[in-house]
Amino acid sequence: MVPEIDQQRFAEAHAAGGLVVDVRNSGEYRAGLVPGARSAPLPDLPLALAGLPRNRPVYVICQSGGRSAQATSLLRQLGYDAHSVSGGTAAWIEAGRPAVTGAAPGAPTATPEEAR
């Protein structure tokens, strides 16, 4: 079973500086994305793993929850504390939470402190 976090708890984690990984394809970002999310499209997720820290929770988001569940399952198998965001970016935006539009999230790179 893939651990899932509801929108309210995710909003709290995000406000506290939680690490968000967006597994949608870059063309989907124009509809909006969670501020500060890191880009790691699902097909490219294995290439992004080196930049993801293992010492903190990772909140995985997509458009509605399907791809984030797949990515979360993979990340958990590899030892990450990953959680799929219920309802995805669509639910985030529908709830009136802040979204960035027109640009892709940053690349999934870790600071030296995160990588420890």
Image (cartoon, grey):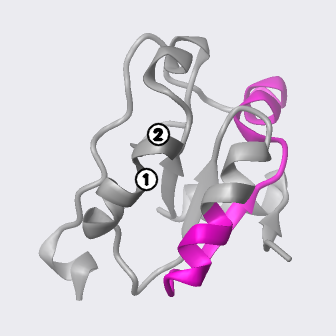
Q: Quadrant of the N terminus?
A: bottom right
CB contact under 8 Å: marks 2 and 1: yes
- Name the side, left or right, on which 114 lies relative to 57: left
Residue shown at the point (59%, 69%) measured from the top left: 74
Residue 112 image offset from top left, x and y in percent: 13, 76
- Look at the numbered disc 1 and give the secondary structure of its residue: helix
Residue at 48% over, 42% down: 43
Picture coordinates of residue 92 (x, y %)? Answer: 75, 35
Question: Which residues fall within the magenta stretch?
Answer: 72-96
Residue 113 versus residue 44: which sits nearer the camera?
44
Q: Rounded to the nearest whole Å, what is the CA distance between mark 2 and mark 1?
A: 6 Å
Residue highlighted by disc 1:
45
Image height of 41 relative to 26, above or below: below
Q: Is residue 76 above or below residue 74?
A: below
Type of the residue with mark 2: Pro
Image side of residue 44 versus residue 35, left or right? left
Q: Position of residue 110 (x, y in %)?
A: 23, 65
Helix or strand or loop: what does disc 2 sit on? loop
The spot of residue 41 in percent (x, y) is 47, 39
Q: Is residue 86 magenta?
A: yes
Q: Amino acid at mark 1?
A: Leu
Mark 2 closeness class: few <14, some 14–19, many ≥20 residues within 10 Å: many
Q: Is residue 36 visible?
A: yes
Of the numbered discs in the image, which one, if any, rests on residue 41? 2
